[in-house]
Amino acid sequence: MAEQHRPHTDMPPAFVAALRSAVRGTSDFGAAARALTTMDASNYRRVPLGVLAPRDADDIAAALAVCREHGVPVVARGGGTSIAGQATGTGLVLDLTCHLRTILDLDPAARTAVVQPGVILDDLRAAAAPHGLTFGPDPSTHSRCTLGGMIGNNSCGAHSVAWGTTADNVAKLSVVRYGGEALHLEQGSGEGPEGVGALVAAHLGLLRTGYPDLPRRISGYALDALLPEHPGGPDPVRAFCGSEGTLGIVTEATVRLVEAPRARALTVLGYADESAAADAAPGLLPYRPLTVEGMAADLVTRSAGLPRGAAWLFVETGGDTPAEARAHAERVLRGADAVDGAVVTDPAGQRALWRIREDAAGTATRMPDGTEAWPGWEDCAVPPARLGAYLRDFRALLAEHGLRGTPYGHFGDGCVHVRVDFDLMTDAGVARFRRFSEETASLVVAHGGSLSGEHGDGQARAELLPRMYGDELVALFHRFKDLWDPDGGLNPGILARPARLDENLRFAALPKRPVDVEFGYPQDGGDFAGAVRRCVGVAKCRTTEASGAGVMCPSFRATGEEAHSTRGRARLLHEMLAGEVITDGWRSEEVRDALDLCLSCKGCRSDCPVGVDMATYKAEFLHHHYRGRLRPAAHYAMGRLPQWLRLARPFARPFNALARLRPLAALAKRLAGIAPERTIPVLAPETYSRWLRRRQGKGTYILSTDRVVALWADTFTEHLSPQVGRAAVRVLEEATGRTVLPPPRGLCCGLTYVSTGQLDAARRVMRRTLDRLHLPPGHPLVVLEPSCAATLRTDLPELLPDDPRAAELATSVRTFAQYLEEYAPDWSPPRLDRPAAGQTHCHQHAVLGDAAERRLRERMGLTGELSGGCCGLAGNFGFEKGHWEVSVACAEERLLPAVRNAEPGTELLADGFSCRTQLDQLAGRRARHLAEVVAETIEEPRPGGGV
């Protein structure tokens, strides 16, 4: 968290002063900090007073003492991925992810680790991996959820059939009560605060008979863990796990580690429907699998190599060797009564399949027709043998209420996740949400189940606990809470004396009518609020390392701050629309500052499970924010780059000479808002189009024949990298036998205008392009610069939704490799047989895909993977003053290390001008467009005439 202490009018000054004098951590009571923490991954929204990032356990104790003295409630927050609303609150939010994320000890012999509450699960797993160990529970948010949050919710994950819940894997806890008292919990060392033992002793019969016996019973307080006959004696640690921050704040935990299989295999089994898959799941448990996960076809949005069927079970098995893991998996396959099945041993293939399952919490938020779906009845659990029957009844109940949902989850444990297309925007829809929740709770109880099987009760289900446990046991829960927290200051409204399940819904604050915006938002019915609602808070953007070819979210990985994550920005936009915390709408400085470090990489458009498109939202915001006002200098300099380059074209040589004079260059950069650390790129003495016209003669631009190639002359290729265009011409003509013709003058995709939010100008430029291009229907357009190709593919039709020419042009766009693959399938590229390194452009990854480029490299014998992530220059971003450090940090994440570690003779590839420029300026290395590499073996043909 940034070092800032901005109060707001609702905060009692005496409390602020007392808190700041008592703690060393940073506090923030400003609008941005509050807006960032109003929501978790649930349907709920509560506005806090402020946020504190404590530095240590003493800070937590001191803060809780001050809060009790002033009557300020407290909610602990880790990754903020809770789905039932328990990570939101109206008082002080304790952000435990800033400082309290240290693994204090890891003992391989004892198979234990001591962790602070803000430790990310994947960080613990990475630290344990060299010892052949892991932490067993692994929710799908493992790359960003914290151990403190897992303890609070008693999280489980896919491997619970083998390794149990979080409560099964915690040995000791250090916690602080409201008021600051520290307690140390360990099995056999007492039951917790004074009076708990007597409470249990007085209600032994109720505690022995009041809980259902099933593996995923998470609802309520686990008071049965304090029974004297509990294995090993009363266990206050187990009783504390799953208390959702209502009893105390964890400051330290000793967790148990389990031996990780040296090899794994995945059996994927296809079934006729989800109920058939659920019926089959218990029969697989005797094979002692690591997972038995279920998923239906309505959750699969793309072909993924799954076996035949309309539902699948993912059954993971382990072994000491790959052969042993495979043999185990094949036994499962032979023993399963499935429609079809397959055993996957390739790690990459397994990861691809698991990604489908892990992204389900996001992808399930959209129905196949684009309708929104929400949590609310998210994760009940029934005895595994009852799961198939429950799902059939559940589907019938959905139909009865006119609702749709996509169940998936941990079928081996009888636990089901589902997002339902509730209408939470109208009173009638909210009333139906309540009726459905009440009836589904009764259905779960009728099947012997638990209202929560993983994510906790929170506000979503706690009101319904009497249906599961009865009034007497729920009253006991309240008394247990009072013994721990007699002042009721810890996470009030959650679990004990809960708020109603239809209160505090996050949609109520949004405007009831669509906001007047510039982009079409075709996936959201033209509604900007609907686009912002896409972010449900699963926080995949908060991962600390980019995996594989992934991009999202480079600015968060560079800063570690929520405000610079995709989710954080979406939350600020949500609050901007709500108008309660952020009150100045499009003029908001809080939103502007958060979006300032958005690289507009478009990574979230593909990597976010729900397709949040922050680059578009940023352009929209900047348009409104600066409408009628003076813009930053960089917007005029780089946002209008195509204009300036056309004006400078006749003076390229003197311009380049002047740019090499340091005093003049420094003055120019200061006036243009360019970072002083940057070097001004060199202008080409001869543009690409001039070269092509000179080469081809005065030919006219006629595209009515299939013997010509339409090659887009983007601004970067035209003025800064004409060698890329020249190379592409040679290759395309050699491979296809067609002629590349000079393009019409004045074409521009509008990229620089869009990225700086100059949307009126962008539309003018785009319309002029459509007027001049005259591309015949169905004729492909080859675009060499990935960012320009992405602009034509997405921004063009979304800014001009009523112009059919825009949609036609968007569908015509091809990358260099895509065109060769489609229009020269029999052509054999040169065989180079050398390693390659470099960057896949983030826009190509997000919008265009790079499968054709991969196949072309493979045919050329260029081995190795290009870096994912973002180069950090990202068009105008890395050139703008104030962005240098983040830009360099993004490059240092993956691109620069990959280039430094490349062996001699490695081909450096980067199709994007930004990526090549970043490598040149930061590493002194020249990368080439793939077209340049292909062209190096092709002789330049003699100039010919036009067509």
Image (cartoon, grey):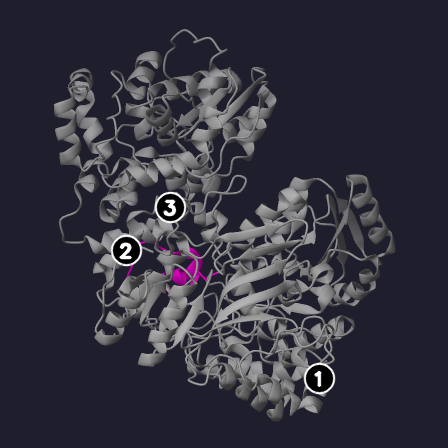
Report the residue marked by disc 3: 555
**At label 1, which amino acid type do we have?**
Ala
- Residue 909 is left or right of residue 526, and the answer is right
Q: CA distance from mark 3 to mark 1?
A: 48 Å
Q: CA distance from mark 1 to mark 2?
A: 52 Å
Give the answer, above or below, for where 57 lies relative to 327. Answer: below
Query: Quadrant of the rendered structure where residue 574 is?
Result: bottom left
CB atoms at circles 3 and 2 under 8 Å apart?
no
Give the answer, above or below, for where 783 lies relative to 360. Answer: above
Tell me where the magenta segment starts and ends, as one range.
516-537
Query: Quadrant of the rendered structure where residue 646 is?
Result: top left
Residue 404 place in picture, x, y as percent? 59, 71
Residue under the image location 56 percent in, 78 percent down: 192
CB atoms at circles 1 and 2 under 8 Å apart?
no
Residue 307 place in picture, x, y as percent? 74, 50
Residue under the image location 12 percent in, 30 percent down: 667
- Earlier along the polypeptide chain: callout 3 or callout 2? 2
Q: Can residue 364 be seen?
A: no
- Earlier along the polypeptide chain: callout 3 or callout 1? 1
Give the structural element (helix, strand or loop) at label 3.
helix
Report the residue marked by disc 2: 3
Q: Can residue 545 be seen?
A: yes
Give the structural element (helix, strand or loop) at label 2.
loop
Screen quadrant of the N terminus: bottom left
Which disc is residue 446 wearing? 1
Nearer the viewer's eye, disc 3 or disc 2? 2
Query: Quadrant of the rendered structure where residue 114 is?
Result: bottom right
Count of numbered badges drawn on the protein:
3
Residue under the image location 39 percent in, 38 percent down: 890
**At label 2, which amino acid type do we have?**
Glu
